[in-house]
Image (cartoon, grey):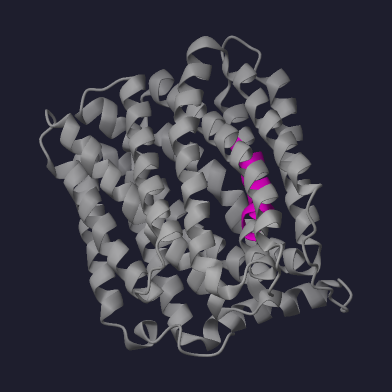
Amino acid sequence: MENQKWYRTYLFIWTGQFFSMITSYAVHFAVIIWLSLEHQSAEVLAFAGIAGLLPQALIGPFAGVFIDRWDRKKVMMYSDGFIAVCAFAMTFLLRNERVDLFWIYALLACRSVGNAFQSPAMQAIAPLIVPEKELLRVSGINQMLQSISTIAGPALGTLAITYFAIADVLYLDIIGAVLAISSLLFVKIPHLKVTNQGSVNTVFTELKEGFGAIYRNKGLSFLFFYAMLVTFFVMPAAIMFPLLTTGYYGGGKWEISLIEVVWGIGMLVGGSVLSVLRITTPKIILVNAMHIVLGFAFLLCGAIPPSWFIAFVVVTTLSGIAMSVFSAAFMTTIQEEVMPQMLGRVFSLYFSIAILPSIIGLLFTGLIAEKVGVAPAFVIAGGLVMVVGIASFLTPPLMKIGRGKKA
């Protein structure tokens, strides 16, 4: 949908989401640092990851149906508000000197519920505002903002958890949500009205239509399948990044923060390239190539000697670049392949489809860390992701994506 004022509208959205992302990253990273240093347990980090993913995976497909039915602007505002209310409630529950892990997991689960609505809604509004030829550049700018957030967020989170109790750190979540909601008050986002009534049968029918949009497009089906495999292989290793930094490379809280910062710098570089340059390379080529680069970077993270911390920093930066380019190209591909009326459902289904296998992988994180080791786990995960990237190039329906009609 062409809109001469699309950039001004998106600028307001970007501004609020930028501050929301920074504070969200800060809170999330502060929680991870607290868990890593307090418990030094791969299982605790794995359960934290599951708590932050499982609610979104379970309710995501149904959330997508309602995102496509409701005003997407209001969906974003209400989900941000829900996260803020949960954070405010948790500030009282986490006042004890000995913090019960149950409440930490509950906090992450509440954030996951809010994200089940907020993230797909944010991705689904772009085609309603941005001209199709600008979608990849907008995705690049989105990655830039996310990258800056991953740079500033960990630094802010590290400072916060150093000088404040975990309960006080949660006020950052509230501040970010208020700013995000305020920015949305100043924009108008087109609402695709749905005439059907919201009965239970209708919800399941529309959910089935979302699956159909993916199934009918064979290239999109393979795109989702390979993304699911990559998430399954990467997630158990990725959740152990703090343990790799502290256990294998001998770092502390500032080294953990540095690794997060350089990951963000890498994402910033990748997003900057996509937003400034008009990339003509087919987006599916970018997606597949970044699978290989990301896998190679993970392999190196676990293969280089523990005394080569600087090399670890450089490789982590490379993986951030790969993730940024992959995410932008992947999201843009979906936005171009699927009709706007279906995007909420398709994005929600993707988040759920990708998350559920990763949760299975996370259940084995403690066993992997104990039996295999953290560094070898990175080598194995990276190698498997590279295999997925090679297989992607050898899949004809996937390589044809972008040439057909929207699902």
Going by the image, does 352 lie left or right of 293? right
Going by the image, does 253 lie left or right of 149? left
Eyeballing the image, is 1 above or below 40? below
- Residue at image location 48% in from the left, 42% down from the top: 49
Q: Which secondary structure dominates the residues rendered in magenta? A: helix
Quadrant containing the N terminus in the rendered view: bottom right
Question: Is residue 364 visible in this depiction of the protein?
Answer: no
Q: Nearer the viewer, residue 4 or 228?
A: 4
- Residue at image location 41% in from the left, 67% down from the top: 278
Q: Nearer the viewer, residue 242 or 100?
A: 242
- Residue at image location 82% in from the left, 71% down from the top: 200
Is 116 within the magenta?
A: yes
Q: Residue furthest front?
A: 4
Residue 136 at x, y percent in the picture:
49, 66
Residue 271 at x, y percent in the picture:
42, 53
Is 378 within the magenta?
A: no
Q: What's the magenta region?
A: 108-120
Quadrant containing the C terminus in the rendered view: bottom right
